[in-house]
Image: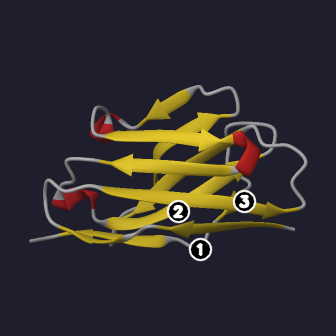
């Protein structure tokens, strides 16, 4: 079994910053991709950013220039630094992991990010 545990969510004012962390544990023998998705109320879950074990990153257009994804392969951990946060960034953020491809196989429980004054 694989477990993904997120941390770092919370309430922040518009223009502020937050950093999310996600640690993978359990029967992990290989990680190809880790990433972050989000789901706002009434909307479908969408990709925010992904990073491969080699460091290749991908971002949804709405967060480019504001969010930075990074990883620590030795710790099986992925981070999402979120800057210049907007109200439309409010959502539950989910960590994901894939062993062989870019498509998520495992999900974390989610962490709430609320951007509001």
Between the residue at mark 1 and the residue at mark 2, the CA separation in whole angstroms equals 7 Å
Q: Residue at x 63, y 55 (%)?
A: 96
Q: Which marked residue is nearer to the observer: mark 3 or mark 2?
A: 3
Image spot of residue 44 (x, y percent):
42, 61
Between the residue at mark 3 and the residue at mark 1, the CA separation in whole angstroms equals 12 Å
Which labelled disc corresponds to residue 94? 2
Quadrant of residue 66 in the image?
A: top left
Q: Secondary structure at mark 1?
A: loop
Q: Exactly how many numbered labels are in the figure?
A: 3
In the image, 107 versus 68, the foreground residue is 68
* Nearer-N-terminus badge (1/2): 2
Which residue position is annotated with label 1? 109
* Nearer-N-terminus badge (3/1): 3
Q: Residue at x 57, y 47 (%)?
A: 35
Q: Which marked residue is nearer to the observer: mark 3 or mark 1?
A: 3
Which residue position is annotated with label 3? 24
Tell whether label 1 touches label 3 (CB within 8 Å). no
Tell whether label 2 touches label 1 (CB within 8 Å). yes
Give the vertical position of 107 relative to 80 (above or below).
below
């Amino acid at each position: 079994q694989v477990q993904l545990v997120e941390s770092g969510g919370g309430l922040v004012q518009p223009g502020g910053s937050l950093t999310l962390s996600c640690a993978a544990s359990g029967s992990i023998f290989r990680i190809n991709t880790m990433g972050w998705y989000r789901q706002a109320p009434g909307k479908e879950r969408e990709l925010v950013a992904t990073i491969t074990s080699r460091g290749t990153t991908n971002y949804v257009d709405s967060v480019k220039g504001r969010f930075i994804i990074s990883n620590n392969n030795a710790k099986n951990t992925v981070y999402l630094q979120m800057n210049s946060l907007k109200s439309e960034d409010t959502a539950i953020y989910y960590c994901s992991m894939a062993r062989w491809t870019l498509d998520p196989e495992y999900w974390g429980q989610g962490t709430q990010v609320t951007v509001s004054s």
